[in-house]
Amino acid sequence: MIGRWRCRVAENTSGRHGAVAAEASRGGAAPDAPVVLASASPRRRELLTSMGVGFIIDPADVDESVIGDESAVEYVARVSALKAQRIADRHHDAVVLAADTTVDLDGRIMVKPVDADDAVDMLMSLSDRWHRTHTGVVVRRGAQVWSQVVTTDVRFVRVTPEAVRWYVDGGEPLDKAGAYAVQGTGGVFVAEISGSVSNVVGLPLAETAELLRCAGVVVAGS
């Protein structure tokens, strides 16, 4: 039987603005619980695979609308928790991993664009400016929950309307928070990153690994 111990997630220092840390206790759940990724994102699937974790996929369908005047950090924390709860209700004996990512431009929450024109507007707004990318990560195992919000700062180059329209017409940004993929063609717009690059992609590797270890999951390098 696994003894009880305090599992502390060290405060993330990636990005100039830090992140929210979490603390929880680990109990006596069996170490061979399946891991369920509550996301259909191919980027998150690839990142989790790179950790050496075996898992199944069961995407969470939740309302991702922004509520009132919540901040971007509050938004990703709430939505990722909703996703984890939804899937935990279906997989009672599993370790559930959920995440949500958004772009924050001076308090403006940029989720996935609704159409091409919205994507163009987002990208032009980001031109030659710093913004923050926040990812909320939640791991649930039974009644226990471990969570963290990780923040990375990103600076765009000065972009032209022609370059933005060409990029949007290619279709890549239409399912991405902030309307760009740093790991894809959208990377040409990124001048500088301060913090976790994988966080901008959609799943901060180091922090996610720590949360999974808290739940008893063996991660590569453990």
Image (cartoon, rainbow, N blue to C red):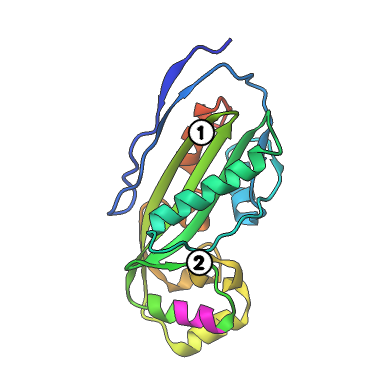
Residue 86 % position (x, y): 64, 45
Check contact, mark 2 vs mark 1: CB within 8 A.
no
Can see residue 89?
yes
Position of the N terminus by quadrant:
top right
User: Could you tell me residue 151's position as x and y percent?
Assistant: 38, 53
Would you say 138 lies left or right of 23 here? right
In the rendered image, residue 179, in percent from the top left (x then y), is placed at: 52, 71
Specify which label sits upstream in the sequence, 2 or 1.
Answer: 2
- Residue beneath the point at 67% across and 38% down: 89
Residue, x 49% and y 90% (percent of image)? 162
Q: Is residue 204 visible?
A: no
Residue 143 falls in which quadrant of the image?
A: top right
The answer to which image quadrant residue 88 occupies is top right
Q: Main secondary structure of the magenta part?
A: helix
Asked if the magenta segment contains residue 193, the reply would be no
Residue under the point 56% across and 34% down: 140
Secondary structure, mark 1, is strand
Amino acid beneath label 1: Val
Query: Among all residues in the image, which is located at the extreme bottom?
Result: 162
Q: Residues within 10 Å of mark 2 (few under 14, many from 20)?
A: many
Residue corresponding to mark 2:
111
Residue that protrudes farthest toward the left in the picture = 16
Compared with 157, 100 (above or below) is: above
Instruction: Name the kind of residue labelled 2 in the image.
Output: Val
Determine the secondary structure under disc 2: loop
Q: Relative to the observer, which residue lies in front, 145 or 39? A: 145
3D distance between C-alphas at marks 2 and 1: 25 Å
Image coords of residue 154 (percent x, y): 37, 63
Q: Which residue is mark 1?
A: 145
